[in-house]
């Protein structure tokens, strides 16, 4: 394996899902729903296949999807973006992340992450040759340590990458935090890459897109996808929204990474994004019920549970159960209890910082969540 990828092992999601299957554990690890996406979206994809949308799509997105993404963004943020010049469709947000790093970061450029961070950020930054620094968000509230951020930004800092609502903690960046980050970025001429794939799973706070703050659109790449909002994680339809001078870099990388993504699924994605408001209201209502079951259950089992305001994840402190670290705890949980969760230490530059925390997902039907809680009550 190439040196730039040497330190990365098989992704933790693959490791845990494989182990969960092997031991018949209920999988509250990898974040994929165990229920299907909506019928009207699946029908639209089937129709698109029948209509012959089966050859390469236009590289930066089928026109109708670029338009639907721009319309959705306008509804959500009030910003008018040009679907032709400022929207790029990618193979999931994961590819948008890779294309952004590879298209806009030069070897040696400094990029700041907030730990814990989604694993692909560090790996793609490593492919781009970036110098990665991280700022740790700490429990119980995972607030941004502003002074630390201020002192970490240097002349070499090219970009900050942030994720709100935040995987794995469920933290949502507050307006105050985003305002401060925005002014630091403007002051120091730094770009921001924002991963907002959980924006429709914002429960206790309003989701704010950094791009919508004054002066920020021109220095922000906003990334999102269809997977979480429509329970279609396997479709891999994502996008990046950015002003033309940044879109150019993203598209240059995208053109040589995947060129284009699934044609038929893009036509269906356009239909999905035009769903009536009631779809999004119902989605949130269903997830609130699931969150309540899991959070109450984890508290009853005896974990220290940290509040999750958004995403479909919740992070707990496992130390009441006396295991050495997060990895040892998760192995025990899978093998002896029959429940899978994700150890968080891989989401830090310094794994020590995550050793007390594990992540559970509640993107499962209520019966599955209850069964997992029962197993833990009995066997932990
Ligand atoms: N985003 C999903 C999660 O955090 C995992 C995606 C993946 O397996 N790479 O669980």
Image: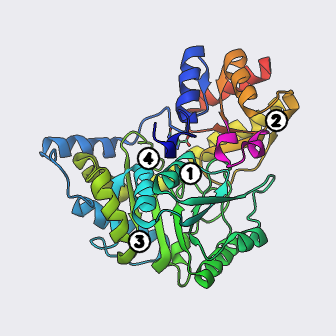
- Mark 2 or mark 1: which comes first in sequence? 1
Q: Which mark is residue 122?
A: 1
Between circles 4 and 3, the one closer to the viewer is 3
Q: CB of residue at label 4: within 8 Å of ligand 1?
A: yes
Sort mark 2 into few (<14), some (14-19) or many (20+) by Cα contacts within 10 Å. some
SS label for mark 4: loop
The numbered dot on residue 242 is 3
- Helix, strand, or loop for circle 1? helix
Q: Is residue 300 left or right of residue 239?
A: right
Residue 188 appears left or right of 149? left
Q: Residue at x 77, y 47 (%)?
A: 306
Front one among 50 and 244:
244
Q: Nearer the viewer, residue 188 or 46?
A: 188
Please provide percent x and percent y for residue 113. 62, 59
- Residue drawn at point x = 57 percent, y = 63 percent: 161
Say whether disc 2 or disc 4 marks the residue closer to the N-terminus. 4
Q: Which residue is mark 2?
A: 303
Q: Which is in the foreground here, disc 2 or disc 1? A: 1
User: Dot 4 corresponds to which residue?
Assistant: 227
Q: Label 4 to label 3, Cα distance in Å?
A: 20 Å
CB under 8 Å between discs 2 and 4: no
Sequence-wise, which precedes: disc 4 or disc 1? 1
User: Looking at the image, is 330 positioned above or below residue 281?
Assistant: above
Q: Is residue 128 above or below residue 16?
A: below
Choose between 372 and 82: the one closer to the eye. 82
Q: Whole-Å distance between the Cαs marked 2 and 4?
A: 29 Å
């Amino acid at each position: 394996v190439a040196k730039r990828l040497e330190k990365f092992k098989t992704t933790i999601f693959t490791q845990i899902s494989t182990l969960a299957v092997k031991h018949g554990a209920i999988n509250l690890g990898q974040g994929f729903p165990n229920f299907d996406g909506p019928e009207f979206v699946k029908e639209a994809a089937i129709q698109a296949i029948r209509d012959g949308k089966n050859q390469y799509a236009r590289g930066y997105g089928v026109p109708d999807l670029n338009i639907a993404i721009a319309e959705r963004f306008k509804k959500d943020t009030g910003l008018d973006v040009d679907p032709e010049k400022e929207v790029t469709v990618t193979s999931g947000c994961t590819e948008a992340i890779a294309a952004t790093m590879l298209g806009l970061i030069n070897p040696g450029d400094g990029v700041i992450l907030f730990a814990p961070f989604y694993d692909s950020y560090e790996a793609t930054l490593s492919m781009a040759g970036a110098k990665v620094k991280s700022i740790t968000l700490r429990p119980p509230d995972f607030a941004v340590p502003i002074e630390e951020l201020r002192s970490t930004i240097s002349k070499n800092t090219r970009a900050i990458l942030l994720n709100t609502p935040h995987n794995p903690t469920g933290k949502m960046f507050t307006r105050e935090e985003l305002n401060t980050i925005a002014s630091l970025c403007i002051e120091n001429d730094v770009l921001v890459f924002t991963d907002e794939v959980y924006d429709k799973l914002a429960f206790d706070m309003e989701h704010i897109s950094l791009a919508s703050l004054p002066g920020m659109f021109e220095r922000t790449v906003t990334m999102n996808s269809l997977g979480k909002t429509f329970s279609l994680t396997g479709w891999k339809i994502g996008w990046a929204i950015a002003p033309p001078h940044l879109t150019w870099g993203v598209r240059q990388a995208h053109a040589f990474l995947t060129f284009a993504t699934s044609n038929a699924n893009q036509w269906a994605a356009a239909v999905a994004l035009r769903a009536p408001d009631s779809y999004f209201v119902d989605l949130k209502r269903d997830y609130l019920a699931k969150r309540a079951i899991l959070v109450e259950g984890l508290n009853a089992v005896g974990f220290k549970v940290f509040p999750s305001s958004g995403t479909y994840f919740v992070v707990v402190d496992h130390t009441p159960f006396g295991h050495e670290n997060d990895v040892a705890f998760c192995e025990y949980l899978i093998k002896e209890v029959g429940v899978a969760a994700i150890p968080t230490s891989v989401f830090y530059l310094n794994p020590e910082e995550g050793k007390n925390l594990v992540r559970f997902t509640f993107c499962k039907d209520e019966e599955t969540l209850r069964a997992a809680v029962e197993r833990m009550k009995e066997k932990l």
